[in-house]
Amino acid sequence: MKMKLTGKSIAVFLLAVVLAAIFDLHAEEELRPYKLINADKLIINKIEGEYITNLFGNVHFFYGETEFFSDKADIFELQKIVRMQGNVEVYDDTLTLFADNVDYFRKTERLFLRGDVLATETHIDSTIRTFKAEEVEYFRNSREFFAKKNVITYDERESMHGTCGELKYFLNDGYGFLMKEPVLSIAENDTLSISAEKIEYFKDYEKVVATFNVKTFSNDFIMTSDFLLYFADEEKAVYLGKPKFTSNLADATAIEFRIFFEEQKIKKAILLDSCYIQFSEFEDKPKKNWAVGDLMEFNFNKGNITFCEAKGNVNSYFQQETAESKNFSANNAKGEHLIIEMDDKNKIERISMKDKVSGKYKFQHQNR
């Protein structure tokens, strides 16, 4: 039986032969190296035994389970390398990547992205975490993400915003670290920020660790130390390594600070060992009042100290200047237990010293 071949059937046959040669259905245990969905133009070259496919315009294909879009793509089928240029989009599980240029190395499951890189990770609750950088490396098998040069990160769920020169993030563990002038901020109206030489975060910011040249700052205060531990659930920070607190109203030092926050403002502060504080009743005035002790605890309201308790080897000095309603007075006292109560304007209302009390009290009557 003879079958007459038309021009159309010949074309279909030749196309089938070409496609079989291109995709090599049995190559390296894969049905095909990739699945092409669309391209406006396709050019195939064979160089030194390797097929190189050039795709142009509205390129869309799958390589394994990863989906790609770009303006142009060059696929090296033997090496299993894809080089993409122009409006590149990569979709891999919960991670979406955008860049000007992307190289994909199938054998090692490594992606190298360059130029206006944006990565978006979707959390289980549909909130997102984003990363921007000039360069990014992403390893699919281990789900490791490394960004460098002008890195910006933001977590919608935790309201965390960070900037640095280099960032590494392990997606499976929720662990990452920022280096090269890192700054991490809780992005609220009254922003609380942390800078250090290195900032690490664990389990999606449940714990933050900052090391060396640590600085915590807001509109109300600055704290410096060598080491910081921050626990998100408790809104608690522990400062070690010569911690120092500075504000318009008070300065303080100790061996260890334990600070509790509420809505990015200090709610309570505990100072441990070799504690020292000096303060003023008025902002930007000389801080002439001071106290030392083995342990100090402070309560705050809207940035102002409302209560202070000092215990163990307490020594203190309090001075009140002459005003219309009061005379000058100065009190230098020692004891084991000191309590200071202040009003909402930071003015001292009551001072109480207990146990082994000694000291001097000076009073100067105002001439009228």
Image: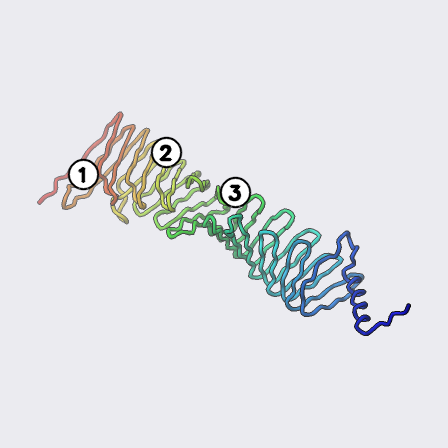
Disc 1 to disc 3, C-alpha distance: 53 Å
Q: Quadrant of residue 293?
A: top left
Whether residue 165 is visible, yes or no, is: yes
Residue 14 lies left or right of residue 284; in this view the side is: right
Q: Nearer the viewer, residue 220 or 8?
A: 8
Q: Nearer the viewer, residue 43 or 113?
A: 43
Residue type, mark 1 in image: Ser
In the displayed structure, would residue 197 be above or below residue 60?
above
| Helix, strand or loop at mark 3 | loop
Name the residue at 79% across, 71% down.
Answer: 11
On residue 203, the disc is 3
The total number of labels drawn is: 3
Q: How is the image coloured?
A: rainbow
Whether residue 200 is visible, yes or no, is: no
| Helix, strand or loop at mark 2 | strand
Disc 2 to disc 3, C-alpha distance: 34 Å
Q: Residue furthest right?
A: 1
Q: Nearer the viewer, residue 231 or 180?
A: 231
Residue type, mark 2 in image: Ser
| Helix, strand or loop at mark 1 | strand
Q: Which mark is nearer the camera, 2 or 3? A: 3
Give the mark nearer the N terminus: 1 vs 3: 3
Q: Residue furthest bottom?
A: 7
On residue 177, the disc is none
Q: Residue furthest front?
A: 1
Q: Which mark is nearer the camera, 1 or 3? A: 3
Name the residue at 32% across, 34% down.
Answer: 292
Name the residue at 49% across, 44% down.
Answer: 205
Residue beneath disc 1: 329
Residue beneath disc 2: 274
Crowding at dot 3, Cα within 10 Å, few <14 / some 14-19 / many 20+, comes out as few
> Could you say where residue 225 lies in the image, as x and y percent from the top left?
43, 42
